[in-house]
Amino acid sequence: MAIDACLQVSTYRSSERAKHQDAPSKISITAFPSARSTALTLRQLVGFARPSAANHTMSYALVQYCLCRLPIPHLERLGHLKIPFELHAAPFQFLQKHHSAFGFAWVERLVWRTHDLHKPYNFLRPELLLAQESGSQRLVAILTIMPGEDYIRHYASMLEVAQHAGAIPSNDGPIHCVLYPHLTQSIMTWTGLTELSANVEPGDIVVLGFVAELLPRFASLVPTSRVVWRQDSPYYGLIRLELRPGLVFSLVGAKYSYWGNLGGRVVTELAARRPRAICYIAKQGTLLSPDDIHCRIYSPTRYCVFDKGQACWRGDEHPAIPINPLSSKFPTFDRGLHVSTPTIVEQDVEFRTQLEAHGAASIDNELAQMARALTDLHEENPSMSRIQLLPLMFITDYLRRPEELGMTVPFDLTSRNQTVQRNKELFLARAAHLVLEAFDVIQRPKAVIVGTGYGVKTILPALHRRGVEVVGLCGGHNRVKTETVATKHKIPCVDLPLEQVQASHGANLLFVASPHDKHAALVQQALDLGGFDIICEKPLALDTAAMGHFIDQARRSPRLCLINHPLRFYPPLIHLKTATKEPTNILSIDIRYLTKRLSKLTHWNSCFSKAAGGGMMLAMATHLLDLIEWLTDSRLTQDSVKTISTSNSIAPLPTEDTQLIKTPDVESAFQMSGSCPSSTKYSVECDGAANTELFSVTVHLANEDELRFIQRKGSPILLEQRYAGREWSPFKVGMEQRIRDGSPWQVSFQYYVEELVEAICMGKRSAFADKATGFDDYARHVGLFGSRVGIV
């Protein structure tokens, strides 16, 4: 029979990884005289009830996930031709070489999808063969997969889903799977890992997972590093990268997928070389929140292995469980119990409920198996030095609860687009830093926060979210409050001078969020000491001479000297700017910021005093002017401000001495208007004593369309558009850009800190400085209205 004619497919191109044709050269059929077992049905292999989209945590994506991993078009054609189909747990090269021993006259390999042959690792996938039985004309289609108990069950379960969905014709009955036990048992030997691992030296840091992607990042972050050994084999690759004398990363990449318990076997083989630690950088699912997808890094310390719906190994019961070297530095990355299961298909809502009852926070197929392998090794060799396990996991999907099956999530396991790749790149950049930090190759900045208001409410959690250690906290008169916060968050230095915190704890990042009239002295102190990246709240100073002096010093400093203007890092506003397409399309911008903040104060506060740098203009005007410049890609000048008006609605207030009252001498509200050099007009309304909470930005475009962002306290963020002559309608934004909960100032600052920390760690301060607001830009903004608030 002409195979190409009946299936309309081409045979494998010889140029595609030809060396893998003879990859299993170490496998000899004579070594396994009874290598082939009796065939089992898919149902016998799977061992759990087959779920459907109606009760699976992936919901509608389950069937798509399964179908895209199978040669469905070819299986359909085979079904129409009444050609039976089998699953064989052996690499295709093995069957090609030994087909006659298993009763086949010939086998031919068919191409059913394009592999990413540019990937150095994890590119070998199941192959589709067509075979003719010896002594007959009967044809059999064979899907070959790498042998491994969990991997076999994984593919068997996906075939079941596909068959039930009608994508695979049933023909003469159930699909069978042929097992090759000796191949499974000896996989570490015939794939060559036993031989390759001999070149891993005791004390190395072994890196698994995204090794090809991490190698150039390690080398870039540590320019003095050098490759001291490189080895390639049909199924693996090894690169030993020396970071410094005595510290070597052994990056081990597999060209196949070591799914499920195969991951444990890989770790067992490598652990025999007594490395210092094994790092696994890969992807996993979360049971906590869909908002964590692509946004949070998980690094568990507790593990559990599930099999056939039951917990078969609990790490909490084993004192010899490996230690995570990152957990003490970044405890927030440990989100709770991690579970590994053999398959994706078994993860239905009932199973999820069971996992949740165990306290599970995350799930994959390999990580807990790796922890189990190391634990077993430690228990068998109690006198050996414990091997550490450092997992850094990229969250790719969320397991829905029963009541959430209709919920749309930003990504799932079927997602493949540019946003996924971009987010993965961000994760890999962060992961490379974290691995290097875990072993003290590089260090994240150590921060000091001055101020226990905004400093504690917004700055502190944002820094902790990015894994930055806060080593110093300085407060005001209420030392009890400062000490309470410091104790809660394990901040070692309380109200100590900057030079002392710098000397004793290596502080090198300063956030100034003290009362306004204290900013200048703190900035001056940090500049004089040197070695600090400085992020200052407004105002930088209360006179132009001081600001000019700071600008001169900042220009001579290799460190960042910035004002906290985070709105340009806020995703909704980024969407708004992107939707305008070109700044020249913007005719006008209207900004409104209304808050109850001042009206809620019942006693005199420095924010009501001009001498202390109070008033809404000094607090908010530069934020909004900076936003206008960013939206229009222009620089405002003195001619850009046409009108400024102020008002005060705050009545006299009692002081700490209840017998005295003071009248504010600053504005509680202001309005500004003008035009940018690009001719875009703008208007700003800001009221600090309003009866509502509102922040809105409306953009009027040249084609008479309008775009707007609105955020009211307690209400969802609105991104809306209005075409000329029509009503407002929701602005279409991809779900991958879900916005975190919190005020625009809190959330935008989180994004600001994320980019700030990565820029510092990666030595890319200048790139971040170009994107952020420096001392000179801030002084220019203040110059547009400073005389109105007493800054001269």
Image (tube, rainbow, N blue to C red):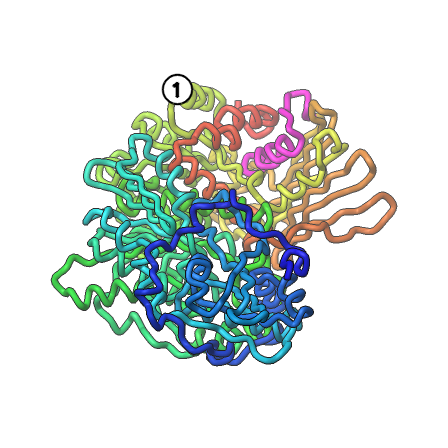
| Depicted 459 relative to depicted 30: above or below | above
Residue 274 locus on image (x, y percent): 20, 54
Q: Alpha-carbon neighbours of circle 1 within 10 Å: few (<14), some, or many (≥20)?
A: few
Q: Is residue 464 left or right of residue 127?
A: left
Residue 176 inside the magenta-drawn segment: no
Q: Residue at x 53, y 40 (%)?
A: 566
Q: Quadrant of residue 748?
A: top right
Count of marks, rendered view: 1
**Residue 157 vs residue 564, the one in the foreground:** 157
Dot 1 amino acid type: Arg
Residue 601 locus on image (x, y percent): 53, 51
**Residue 105 vs residue 493, the one in the foreground:** 105
**Residue at the farthest right position:** 725
Residue 631 inside the magenta-drawn segment: yes
Q: Is residue 61 left or right of residue 212?
A: right
The prevailing secondary structure element of the residues shown in magenta is helix
Q: Residue at x 43, y 42 (%)?
A: 429
Question: Where, quadrant-wise, is the N terminus in this rendering?
Answer: bottom right
Instruction: Kindly identify which residue carries mark 1.
Output: 556
| Depicted 347 relative to depicted 649: above or below | below
**What range of the chain is rendered magenta?**
617-641
Residue 481 locus on image (x, y percent): 35, 53
Q: Residue at x 67, y 69 (%)?
A: 81
Q: Residue at x 68, y 47 (%)?
A: 709
